[in-house]
Image (spheres, rainbow, N blue to C red):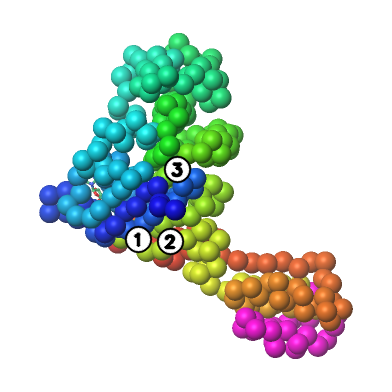
Amino acid sequence: MAPVIAVEHLRKAYGSFVAVEDVSFDVREGEIFGLLGPNGAGKTTSVECIQGLRVPEAGAITVLGLDPRTQAAQLRRLVGSQLQESALPGRLKVWEALDLFASLVPGGPDWRQVMERWGLTEKATASFASLSGGQRQRLLVALAVVNEPRVVFLDEMTTGLDPAARRATWQLIEAVRDGGATLVLVTHFMDEAEHLCDRLAIIDGGRIVATGSPQGLIAEHGGELLIRFSTDRSDVSFLEEIEWVDTVSRRGTHVAVAGHGPVLALVGAELVRNGIVPDDLRVQQATLEDVFLRLTGRGLED
Ligand SMILES: Nc1ncnc2c1ncn2[C@@H]1O[C@H](COP(=O)(O)OP(=O)(O)OP(=O)(O)O)[C@@H](O)[C@H]1O
Ligand SMILES: [Mg+2]
């Protein structure tokens, strides 16, 4: 199946400054795809080029088989996008904004339902300017999905939301995907990326440095897995024979096994086969944040 979004060797400069050097990735139908990267990495620039909002210097992009450079008008009807705050007039009321955006598609979807679902009903007649930061953010995301788009772009959708609103937003985003949409999320929240994204790309200095599923990236770049447990058995040298085990160390009754890949399942199986069933088995593994910092890691001053 052809990807919903295909980006090949995208390059975008602002004057002499190259913001996006060489970015390539595919987004598959029905997927939630994440773009992660430090400030200034080129995430927003890339997403804007993909939507036809900016014209790249080089590279090929298709979205739903359309070229955003030459078919932006056709694309606009199929795509939903989170606006920047500055794009809405302060006096516009919440219901007016939803009504306006829903009316852009023929047969206009029921925006009242969207307003209810996104918890905005009690603010229906409030002006955009009078909303709190989190309420504004929620409205901007609701506007991105109100016209039932096939592809949705959300750039830092949960920034400024309280923890409950963030979790609620995740559920709503999953519902949008379950409705058949394909989503691209730009986020700085590793828990959000891990929870929502099927696959993600880490971008740094205008280049993709890694692509994969959150678990796949952790397995590939997260380094060793550490398995700890305690046992009275004095000889656990059989663990050293297991493929993927790097080291076995013990202190008193505490045993630590370091290894790679599928080592956890293999160690578990071998322990059980040898009659050891520890009730305190723990696994330490790198998180997506560790991987992110390892791949992009440097201080703010660099
Ligand atoms: N309109 C512009 N004119 C000049 N330079 C720009 C413009 N927009 C972005 N840049 C520069 O391009 C680089 C990439 O910016 P971009 O907004 O794509 O980063 P980002 O990955 O979205 O960062 P953040 O996480 O901070 O949102 C930055 O160095 C930024 O200063
Ligand atoms: Mg950005």
Q: Which mark, by number, is residue 140?
A: none
Residue 174 inside the magenta-drawn segment: no
Which residue matches tag 1?
Answer: 208
Q: Which residues are magenta?
A: 230-252
> Is disc 1 surrounded by few (<14), some (14 to 19) or many (20+) residues within 10 Å?
many
> Is disc 2 surrounded by few (<14), some (14 to 19) or many (20+) residues within 10 Å?
some
**Secondary structure under the numbered disc 2 in the rendered image:** strand
Direction left: furthest residue:
15
Q: CA distance from mark 1 to mark 3?
A: 19 Å
Which residue matches tag 2?
Answer: 211
Q: Quadrant of the C terminus?
A: bottom left
Picture layout, residue 276 above or below residue 92: below
Instruction: Tell me which amino acid carries mark 3.
Output: Leu
Pick the residue in front: 299 or 258. Answer: 258
Which residue matches tag 3?
Answer: 183
Q: From the viewer's perspective, tell me whether residue 137 is left or right of residue 166.
A: left
